[in-house]
Image: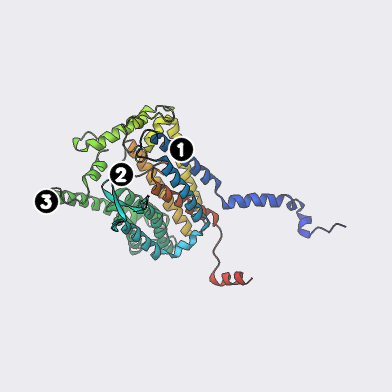
């Protein structure tokens, strides 16, 4: 004899069969942001294909190493995904200490190694890492944890100054040896400040002060270089050349960087509408395009796929930024929104500067292109940021149990 249906089942008989299935699907999409994973997978695939085409004729780059970096990056992404990002909200001081340690690592004798004239790398056995790359996600978490304390309102000049000081710490550390990475952190930090409730008037004032400081720095560098006969410089000659060549490419003093810029634009233009085909980037394979797999990876991709391929790549980046913004809106916590804003700001700055410098409309700063440029350290930190976004998405709308609630749950 069949049992009588419960009152709930009598009122909603359809929920007994359809409900659980829809609930399972809904739970799947509530935990996994599938559009973000698809966009990231497509960008990584395009990046690996482009790097591989460069390695066919350039032994300075290793496709195996890049693929290994992607594999480890995916593992780090999963690790940060399953970890509750909200734990970082109370770790401002530990995050600051980690930033300082990462800055000091290359200075340790026997650990730091010099690459391209700068001691930015550490060598552990056969593994080479660039610690300042890892300062990007750490700095985003650190700045977000500090700014979140103001609960969306930073109107006091003193409070704004405190937040700027927090942003300035990693910026100044990194700017000593790596101007490009320091500018990425500076931009993402101010995006966090803006989303965190910073008053517009303080941003205008900060911009004016920054311009004055840059002018004073350039003047001091010129005077110091003249007095010491070039022995002592605040900004190195190659850095000045990279920054100024886009404004005056015909200046003989910047001939090397002007050559790089011209070859980059030739590569992009020669791709025309549909490109030359995969593996047929003659500017890169012919040795005309320097740093083909890093700074100028977009040129190689555009030469192979043409204008249409470049548009598709830009649309993927647009989707990536939109998804980061959407995750920030849906985070349910101010801290999560600030992390998403910092990651979005970082990716936006990297895409605009990298592609802009390839087109000759931005200074050459050596900023890589997310998911495309060659480099294991860069790939690892980029995947860490994806993991943070996925963690924000997974934990949105929920809150961590308070201490007394955890005790009750443990005893239940």
Q: Nearer the viewer, mark 1 or mark 2?
A: 1
Q: CA distance from mark 1 to mark 2?
A: 23 Å
- Quick one: label 1, few (<14), some, or many (20+) residues within 10 Å? some
Q: Earlier in the sequence, mark 1 or mark 2?
A: 1
Residue 146 sits above or below residue 55 on the image: below
Residue 175 image position (x, y, % from top left): 29, 52
Could you tell me if the residues under marks 3 and 2 are in contact, i.e. CB atoms within 8 Å?
Answer: no
Q: Residue at x 53, y 56 (%)?
A: 82
Mark 2 lies on a secondary structure that is loop
Mark 3 lies on a secondary structure that is helix
Q: CA distance from mark 3 to mark 2?
A: 27 Å
Q: CA distance from mark 3 to mark 1?
A: 50 Å
User: Which residue position holds label 3?
Assistant: 227
Could you tell me if the residues under marks 3 and 1 are in contact, i.e. CB atoms within 8 Å?
Answer: no
User: Which residue position holds label 1?
Assistant: 46
Q: Residue at x 83, y 59 (%)?
A: 4
Residue 10 image position (x, y, % from top left): 79, 56
User: Which residue position holds label 2?
Assistant: 365
**Circle count:** 3
On screen, residue 189 versus residue 14, left or right, reads left
- Quick one: label 2, few (<14), some, or many (20+) residues within 10 Å? many
Q: Earlier in the sequence, mark 3 or mark 2?
A: 3
User: Looking at this view, is 193 or 390 the one in front?
Assistant: 390
Quarter of the rendering occupied by the N terminus: bottom right
On screen, residue 149 versus residue 104, left or right, reads right
Mark 1 lies on a secondary structure that is helix
């Amino acid at each position: 004899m069949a049992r009588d249906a419960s009152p709930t089942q009598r009122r909603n008989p359809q929920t007994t069969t359809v409900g659980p299935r829809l609930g399972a699907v809904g739970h799947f999409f509530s935990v996994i942001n599938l559009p973000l994973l698809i966009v990231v997978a497509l960008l990584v695939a395009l990046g690996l294909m482009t790097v591989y085409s460069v390695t066919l004729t350039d032994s300075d780059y290793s496709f195996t190493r890049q693929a290994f970096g992607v594999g480890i990056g995916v593992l780090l992404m999963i690790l940060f995904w399953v970890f509750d990002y909200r734990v970082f909200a109370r770790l401002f001081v530990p995050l600051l200490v980690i930033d300082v340690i990462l800055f000091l690592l290359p200075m340790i004798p026997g650990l730091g190694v010099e690459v391209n004239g700068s001691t930015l790398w550490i060598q552990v056995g056969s593994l080479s890492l660039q610690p300042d790359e890892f300062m990007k996600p750490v700095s985003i978490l650190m700045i977000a944890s500090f700014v979140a304390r103001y609960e969306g309102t930073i109107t006091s000049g003193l409070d704004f100054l405190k937040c700027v000081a927090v942003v300035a710490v990693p910026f100044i550390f990194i700017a000593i040896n790596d101007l490009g990475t320091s500018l990425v952190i500076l931009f993402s930090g101010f995006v966090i400040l803006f989303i965190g409730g910073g008053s517009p008037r303080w941003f205008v004032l900060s911009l004016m002060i920054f311009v004055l400081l840059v002018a004073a720095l350039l003047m001091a560098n010129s005077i110091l270089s003249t007095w010491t006969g070039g022995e002592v410089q605040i900004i190195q000659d190659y850095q000045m050349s990279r920054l100024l060549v886009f404004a005056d490419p015909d200046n003989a003093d910047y001939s090397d960087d002007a050559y790089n810029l011209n070859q980059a634009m030739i590569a992009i233009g020669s791709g025309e509408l549909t490109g030359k085909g995969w593996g047929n980037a003659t500017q890169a394979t012919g040795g005309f395009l320097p740093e083909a797999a890093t700074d100028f990876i977009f040129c190689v991709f555009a030469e192979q796929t043409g204008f249409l391929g470049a548009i598709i790549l830009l649309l993927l980046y647009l989707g990536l930024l939109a998804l980061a913004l959407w995750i920030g809106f849906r985070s349910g916590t101010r801290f999560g929104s600030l992390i998403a804003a910092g990651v979005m700001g970082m990716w936006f700055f990297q895409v605009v500067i990298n592609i802009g410098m390839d087109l000759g409309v931005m200074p050459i700063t050596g900023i890589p292109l997310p998911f495309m440029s060659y480099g294991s350290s860069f790939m690892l930190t980029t995947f860490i940021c994806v993991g943070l976004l996925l963690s924000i998405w997974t934990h949105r709308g929920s809150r961590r149990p308070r201490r007394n609630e955890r005790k009750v749950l443990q005893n239940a």
